[in-house]
Image (cartoon, coloured by chain):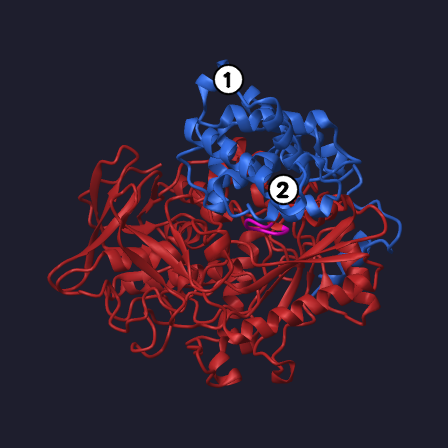
Amino acid sequence: MTIRFHRLSQSREDRAGMSRRMFLMTTTLAGITTGTLLGRASLAQGAGLGEAESARLLRMVQDIYPHPDLLQIAHYQAIVDAVVSNADDDAFAALQDGLARIEAKAQELFGVPYTDIEDPDAREGLLRHFQNEGFFQNVRWTAYFGIYNNKEIWPLFGYEGSSVEYGGYINRGFSDITFVPPGPTLEERLAEVQK
Amino acid sequence: MAKFDLNDDSVAVIIGSGAGGGTLANELAQRGIKSVVLEAGKRFGLEDIENDEWAMFQKISWLDKRYSGGGWHGAVNHPTLPTWIVKGYGGSTIHWAGVALRFKDFEFKTRTTYGAIDGANVEDWPIDLEEMIPWYEKAELKMGVTGKTTGMPHLPWNNGFRVLAEGCRRTGRSDYRSGPMAINSVERDGRPACQQIGFCMQGCAIGAKWSTMYTELPRAEETGNCEVRTEAMVLKVEHDDAGKVNAVVYADKDGNQHRQKARIVCVAGNSIESPRLLLNSASSMFPDGLANSSGQVGKNYMNHTTGGVYAVMPEKVHMYRGTSVAGIVGDEVYHDPKRGFSGGYYLEFLSLGLPFMAAFLEPGNTGWGRSVARALEGYDRMSGVWVLGEDLAQERNAITLHPTEKDQYGLPVPIVSKTPHNNDYEMTAHMYETSAEIYEAVGATDVYELPAYPATHNMGTNRMHADPDKGVVNAYGQAHDIANLFVSDGSQFTSSAACNPTLTIVALAIRQAEYIAQEMNARNI
């Protein structure tokens, strides 16, 4: 057999990484209801979140997967934008309501706005109150796909993604570490399987 | 490829095209026995394989509606994804990682070895290792398993397994190696040698890993004795007045129903669909479902006692480079009640890509925040294992039918219930401790314990037993109640053993094919 390596083309949608498809996959994994996850064309053209709401949502996605030394604000802003543009009317209303309740809880517990809480553990503890709610998990899974399934971000975590188009790792470091001994040689591996 | 008429009642109808059904189809075809394979999923080829975890999950997984039940964490965290198996031409042999281990002798004799266990339904198989060795050898030659049977060397060790192996060496272990794997380490049987691509469980893009998708199924079709119909979801197995099965009803991709006549019917739809089909085929003669006079159809669902362990090392590992399961540790596969549990377990090096690591490190609603993010920043320094061990049969672990909810075919939705036995909790604790000890011996700075993934190893729901009151099928997978009805997949397992089930499924299918040919020639079926 001739080995033919193929370079698989990515559709624009795949590259966006935060398509509707990801929600369908997520719902399978996590059992979220799908009703609220379809596109929201009307909103994309018009009204979005207010300034304070946007700031809260940006803080929220950073607190959900905080990588301050690895990611830029722009990475998180892209997730905020995806959360808003993916939300239908019901999901958008739930998001606004959720953000308002996070703010109210911040005032109740700490007496300051959520975005002004300096201790990251305190902010995380605040968000834990909301983690079983649909609006929260929608934001969380959008952040998940926007970060950990995002081919542009993978190199920052040391993940290289697809390898078949490069001929795999057979000649590209599949066994290149030096802090443990090498594995057995081909001769040793052949000797092991003699009858 | 042959085309058989719907009214041709001389054919064997095989339901499913994975390790069991695909192997059986080819074995029968090579013997000149005609068959129609009905596969619920689409026809896939190598060109459909991508190195992308989510894209392939979406493309090939069995995503029809199902519910998780019972006391395992997935009933909460994976409520509609109890299992992780494939719907497509080749079945779950597209997704399997290639581990091709044999059962140990004591694992065929679990009731004799372990004794009666409270809350469990443990029994002996009607066959043993001595009986199975020649069939294991045939399976290893067919699949191309590295090791003594083929003489093919085990695969070279990748970074992630080298870390695990060194930990094993430093903790005094001796049984750790990079095989047996049904992955070519050299070019063999028209398939190339492994290129250490990774993504084995997303389908091998070059066909170095054995899968019925590009071995058994096309070879069966080439004989002219086998017709594979894809997107053909079987709804019901029918029988005649004498209680012999004689036809199956299936829906095509447009939902149109067809009725294929059959001389024999072989059910190989994996351990959820196979019992579900038998239960859905209930009739006035068989009110509890076909082949169910024992009441054991759908019961004794086993999927291995499992967990994951990922350790962060002081230096880069890049564990995703190379085969996904790059090595196997067998030192813990023995039965010693002093350990506090029955049966043994393997540690298998398993790499996950960043997307799946981030999804499964802490599944469910709580898997976010500083601790998760910090762990994932160590991704490129991780090595890890999937631990899997004997899962005791329990009657309460079962496939049942939803009382009201129907799927897209109008069939009751299956509920897959799994509640761990105390044996599982004891074993899991031991697995985690062993894994941590091994990795700490190589300098691990953090060790993360992951709960069970949605199961790929599904077994036991139409089990073999010598006694027709205690099992569904005999030692050849033939239904005790209906002589021309066979079970040809992992649902016929009496015990789970510690090892991955595929090699045993293939060995049993080869053995079953010979038995079917013999019984057909003798006009017994």
Q: Is residue A31 above or below residue B443?
A: above
Residue found 67% across the figure and 49% down from its top: B351
Q: Give me the chain letter of mark 2.
A: A
Task: Pick whichever, B516 or B400, lies toward us.
Answer: B400
| Range drawn in magenta | B361-366
Furthest toward the left, the residue is: B241
Compared across the picture, whether B319 is left or right of A22 comes to right
Q: Which chain is red?
A: B
Q: Secondary structure at mark 1?
A: loop
Does the segment drawn in magenta span residue A66? no
Of B356 and B329, nearer the camera is B356
Question: In the picture, residue A181 is in which quadrant?
Answer: bottom right
**Residue B66 vs residue A113, the one in the foreground:** A113
Residue under the point 44% across and 75% down: B125
The quarter holding residue B478 reads bottom left
**Who is closer to the viewer here, A68 or A117?**
A117
Q: Position of residue B408 (x, y in %)?
A: 29, 41
Label 2, on which residue?
A: A106
Precedes in sequence: disc 1 or disc 2: 1
Q: Quadrant of the C terminus of chain B?
A: bottom left
Q: Is residue B363 magenta?
A: yes
Residue at point 74% right, 53% down? Answer: B383
Residue that carries the numbered disc 1 in the rendered image: A47
| Chain ID for blue | A
